[in-house]
Image (cartoon, rainbow, N blue to C red):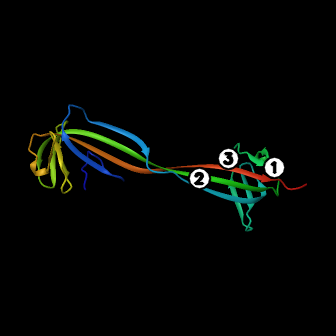
Amino acid sequence: MRIPRGFGALAAGVLSVSLVAIVSAQSTQTKETVPGGAAKVTTKEVKGEVVLTGSNWLIAKDPAGEYRIYDVKAGRKFIINGVPKTLGELQKGTMLTAKVTTTETPLVKRTTKITQGTLFWSSPKSVIVTLENGENKQYEVPPDFKFEVEGKQLSTIELRPGMKLTATRIVEEPMVTISEDVVVTGTAPMK
């Protein structure tokens, strides 16, 4: 379905067009973010031995013998032998285990726009509506689409010039928020 300029382009999601008898109201637009499904939670465990530390990084050797560098956020605490330690307090040879829990929460960013107009012309596949600002706009209409006018379901060919219509357009854009919770524990090397 082609959506003409003025109503914007459909970026992603669902378009719902409903034309009903006019209720004396102005054009309005609302935006909201709503849940888009169940959250996906994954947990991953990463192990390694501290080889070298810097002001905001550390290098660890994983169990396969590979060296990896990790950025460390300021203020990060590591629980070593049950005691909270800062990056600067880690000793070479400390065995670390990071438990990373990632939560991916699907959301839907929904924009609803309601616009009023008067039917200027209609055909089986499109309508031309005179908007409140006096501008005429043409809109394509899906096959078998029914319009509600004064409580009746009408096809495009049953519409008559001068009928007052309200168009409701809903655009839904899916998005995902990702949050991570990282807990790092470990054991210091024996002295």
Residue located beneath label 1 in the image: 81
Point out residue 16 in the picture as x, y percentages from the top left corner.
28, 48
The image's mark for residue 73 is 3
Furthest residue in direction bottom, as rendered: 64
Of residues 9 and 146, the one nearer the viewer is: 146
Point out residue 148 in the picture as x, y percentages from the top left corner.
18, 44
Question: In this rendering, would 89 be left or right of 8?
Answer: right
The image quadrant of residue 31 is top left
Point out residue 171 in the picture as x, y percentages from the top left corner.
33, 47
Residue 157 visible here? yes
Callouts 3 and 2 close, C-beta under 8 Å: no
Residue at image point 31% right, 46% down? 170
Q: CA distance from mark 2 to mark 1?
A: 25 Å
The image's mark for residue 102 is 2
Q: Earlier in the sequence, mark 2 or mark 1?
A: 1
Q: Residues within 10 Å of mark 3 (few under 14, many from 20)?
A: few
Q: Earlier in the sequence, mark 3 or mark 1?
A: 3
Q: Earlier in the sequence, mark 3 or mark 2?
A: 3
Of residues 150 and 139, the one nearer the viewer is: 150
Residue at image point 81% right, 47% down? 89
The image's mark for residue 177 is none
Tell me if residue 126 comes above or below residue 116 in the rendering.
below
Residue 9 visible here? no
Question: In this rendering, would 132 be left or right of 11?
Answer: left
The image quadrant of residue 135 is top left
Q: CA distance from mark 3 to mark 2?
A: 17 Å
Q: Nearer the viewer, mark 3 or mark 2?
A: 2
